[in-house]
Image (cartoon, rainbow, N blue to C red):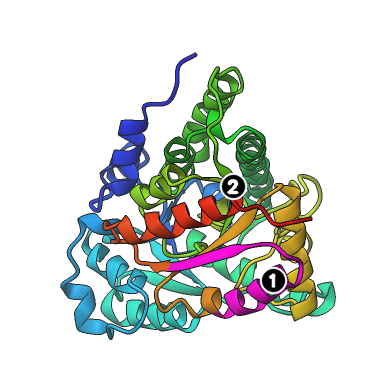
Amino acid sequence: MTLPDFDRLKALWEDPEFTEVAHWQARHPGAPVVGYLPAYAPRELVYAAGGLAVGLWGAGPQVEIIRGDIYYQSYICRLPRSVLETAPALGAFSGVIFPSICDVMRNLSGMWQILFPHQWAAYLDLPQNFSSETGGRFFHETLIDLATRILGHPPDAAYSQRLAQAIALTNRQTDLFRRLAGLRSKFPWKVPMDEWYTLLRSALVLHPEAHIPMLAAYLALAEKRDSRPLDHIRVHLAGAFCEQPTIGLLKTIEASGCYIVSHDLLLGLHWFTAPLKETGDPFESLVDGYLNRSGPAPFKYCGPREKAETFLALVREHRADGVIFAAPSFCDPSLLDRTLLREALETHGIPSASFKYAENTCQYSGIAEVAGTFSDSIRLWPKES
């Protein structure tokens, strides 16, 4: 058993041409390839159709934005412009799913329909009513409509059987993510941040059947890794659920004295707090997962008190010494949450720090100062009991 080839995995998800996806299509002629935007989409619907779900979470710093700036103003996040810049490489995709997490995503879904009429564009309206009679019924119908788009015809009994198998497959993947997250929370020095993040992000490009063996091999070796902890504080990283920071930014935070023991990076891949049901109606399993097994998120409604209490419980669960709020510039859901959550932390004497970034942020000196000062303030001047 050997470690995954992290250089290869990093090259896969950094590739703006999606070469690995093209290779997959060549091996599976006629199978649907469906892109999905942050933060959550029911990938199982695509796998059940024999297809590949590809996460489109931005192109990072390696793509110069030209085409995207034609269609979008400068005072919104970089993500939609970045996705439009890579759109030519997505020409062979069957369609793209746009989850309803913000106004920018809604606008991008409409823009896509105009610019790329040869593809279908599905706006995935995630319900904010969590009763089974209202939100559940609405989401069930939404999933049926989405499956119909992916298949080209309404789902039948054979598709439902394959959907149940797809749910079991993603449950295995999510369980490995959960176990790795638990290991990193307890022993962050055994699971370096760049390796953990690369494993997460490569899941946006690879089919779970190819990705799961890598996760299992890495987990087995990481558990036995003989390494020693550094004199770092433990932090929860909040706000990076959509547009993603660079690996360099994450490594800078840790090199400055802050172990990231929990986070909302690539949230949709590890959002569910319990496995989805593998028996019964698989569409209802996906509905139940969203309504009852999904964790907190800036785009998911709950009352201010419940939101604050859930966040505090998460920080305490991972024994975080403090919280770093890292929000993409102009990200309304993340920045709006920050005010409420920061007040809750202050009330309970939990320190926090904050900064904003973009997916092409490559100058880290300011972030290093924020993280380093935050770490020093907790390690050298601990709060009096």
How would you classify the magenta stretch by its main secondary structure? helix
Between 314 and 368, the one lying in front of the other is: 368
Query: Does residue 276 show up?
Result: no
Which of the numbered marks, if any, corresponds to residue 379? 2
Classify residue 165 as left or right of residue 309: left
Residue at (69, 62) in percent of width and height: 350
Check the image and report above or below for 203 versus 374.
above
Of the two numbered discs 1 and 2 on the same chain, state the one appearing first in sequence: 1
Residue at (58, 74) in percent of width and height: 338
Check the image and report above or below for 316 versus 329.
above
What is the C-alpha distance between the residues marked 1 and 2?
18 Å
- Residue 140, picture quadrant: bottom right
Range shown magenta:
336-355
Classify residue 35 as left or right of residue 62: right
Residue annotated with mark 1? 346
Q: Residue furthest top?
A: 1
